[in-house]
């Protein structure tokens, strides 16, 4: 179980960095927000996995408190990021189509 959380931690951190760099390289404003929401969801997965890892390998009450806080913040980040993702998706698709037509 610990190895699975470590895989999630590393994978989500790599995806967060990928989307963060992609955000800086994107020119279109709506597309930039859409990619940023994917970065926020990756950060939420990272926080949740890190909190779960602390809860699984807890050595004291501080680990339980910090793990719970990280897990709750990560879940909130995932849920709110997914809502924003669904909100920006049609606008980003429309913006990409307009750029394709104008190019």
Image: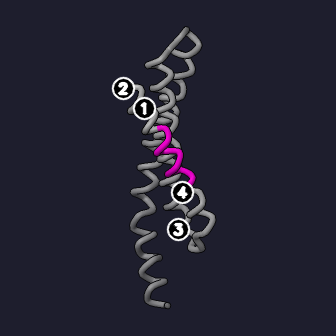
Q: Which residue is mark 4?
A: 18
For the residues labelled 1 and 2, say whether their Cβ atoms are less than 8 Å apart. Answer: yes
Find disc 1 in the rendering and name its residue.
5
Mark 4, secondary structure of its residue: helix
Q: Is residue 76 visible?
A: no
Residue 100 spot, x, y in % from top left: 44, 85
In space, the residues marked 1 and 2 are separated at their CA atoms by 7 Å
Q: Residue 46, how many percent across, how many down?
A: 50, 39
Name which of mark 3 and mark 2 comes first in the sequence.
2
Which mark, residue 19?
Answer: none
| Mark toward the start of the polypeptide (4 vs 2) | 2
Real-space CA distance between mark 3 and mark 2, rounded to the nearest whole angstrom: 38 Å
Residue 14 at what x, y percent from top left? 52, 49
Cα distance between the residues tagged 4 and 3: 18 Å
Disc marking residue 1: 2
Query: Is 77 on the left-hand or right-hand side of 25?
Result: left
Q: Which residue is mark 3?
A: 30
In magenta, the rendered stretch is: 9-19
**Viewer-proximal residue among 18 and 96:** 18
- Which marked residue is nearer to the observer: mark 1 or mark 3? 1
Q: Is residue 70 above or below residue 41?
A: above
Q: Are marks 4 and 1 in contact (CB under 8 Å)?
A: no
Q: Earlier in the sequence, mark 4 or mark 1?
A: 1
């Amino acid at each position: 179980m610990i190895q699975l959380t470590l895989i999630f931690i590393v994978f989500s951190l790599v995806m967060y960095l990928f989307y963060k760099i992609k955000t800086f390289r994107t020119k279109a404003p709506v597309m930039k927000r859409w990619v940023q929401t994917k970065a926020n969801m990756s950060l939420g997965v990272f926080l949740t996995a890190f909190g779960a890892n602390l809860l699984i390998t807890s050595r004291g009450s501080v680990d339980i408190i910090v793990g719970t806080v990280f897990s709750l913040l990560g879940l909130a980040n995932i849920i709110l990021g997914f809502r924003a993702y669904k909100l920006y998706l049609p606008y980003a698709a429309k913006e990409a189509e307009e750029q394709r037509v104008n190019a």
